[in-house]
Amino acid sequence: MKKYLFITITLLLFSLSSFSRVFRVGYNGTPLKGVDFTSITEANDSAKVGDTIQIYGFQSGSINKRLVILGFGYKFNDHPGLQSNPGIATNEINNPSYASIYFDPGSDSSIIEGCQISTYIASNKVIIRRCYAGQVYLRDDLVSIQDFKMYSCYGMSISDYSRVGGGQHKFASKNIQIFNCAGGQLTLNSSESQSSGVLINCNDFYPYANDKPKILMKNCILNVGGSLQQFTSGNNNTIYDNNIFVYPEPTPTLPGSNNKYSQLNDSIFIPNPNPGISDENQYQLRPNSPAKDFGIDLSGKPTDCGIFGGELAYRYKIGGQPAIPAFYKLSAPTNSASSNPYNITVSVRSNN
């Protein structure tokens, strides 16, 4: 009863808030006709523009219209209390949603959120947010990818398709926007100087060393293995502003202004609460960190460097839960109570 009420209330909330339908893929409860499907492609075929597809477990497929792909978040075991109250037994939604998905032509302005992903993009204005540990391939062999945006993601990288598919670079990837992401790499078409993008308020996320696109790297903190020259050599079209580097200043100095070099890692971050584990909390800044108020936001005001600073809408959210309320607990006197009124308590948390 509890599980079904959770799903019913959640679906009702989605419907009332967005005036769109919600389809489920991979739900392991009793299927509902017209609601539950076995693949993303099947759900896409029944969906209309603006509808939502909710992902359970590992799912794959393609979409060719503007849709919202929604998972439950990730790494719940590392962040107890995100989906349920501490002490409440875990349930099926504590398993991450994994989507292997193609954004085919026609899927412009689609959104995917709260998933571990691997994806191919052949449309414009796609948004990936609060996702984890995936690879994004831009189909520059098919179309010019424009206005792609990714923010509040962890352990994800972006590259043009020909790096893995063997196809030819034909089109530029323009205005690729990466905000508040950690642990990744941006690899745009090395033969196309018209490609462009930004990396803003990221941690350990860098443009590939030998590419030629026009890139702005701003308000970032770079502290990964190797040397600064390894990440910046050959980036003649990359501009670096207001970044924090643990590496010494290179010769010649990087294009751009107001960067800090040779910063000690221990002076930047609070000690990782989970030593030896790759965890988003390792990027929390010390109160007196050199990254505090060293960045400049889009309005020109000081802001912290790294994933927890910058624009409020893009700031990193631990665990990647989608920006919707989560109902996590139902309390009822008994399943067979006959009192009138019959009192129940529903616990909900906001993930905005």
Image (tube, rainbow, N blue to C red):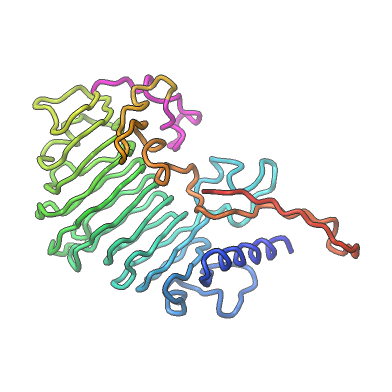
Residue placed most toward the observer, 257 or 283 = 257
Q: Does the magenta segment cover residue 269?
A: yes
Residue placed most toward the observer, 211 or 225 = 211
- Dividing the picture into quadrants, the one containing residue 206 is top left
Q: Main secondary structure of the magenta part?
A: loop
Q: Is residue 92 above or below residue 64?
A: above
Residue displayed at 18% across by 60% down: 162
Q: Quadrant of the N terminus?
A: bottom right
Q: Residue furthest right?
A: 339
Residue displayed at 61% across by 74% down: 31
Residue displayed at 54% across by 48% down: 351
- Dividing the picture into quadrants, the one containing residue 286 is top left
Residue placed most toward the observer, 2 or 317 = 317
Q: Does the magenta segment cover residue 282?
A: yes
Give, as a single range, the part of the protein colored magenta. 261-285
- In percent of width and height, residue 309 lies at 39, 35
Residue displayed at 17% across by 38% down: 239
- In percent of width and height, residue 56 lies at 53, 62
- Dividing the picture into quadrants, the one containing residue 290 is top left
Q: Is residue 93 left or right of residue 258?
A: right
Q: Is residue 17 left or right of residue 185?
A: right
Residue placed most toward the observer, 146 or 274 = 146
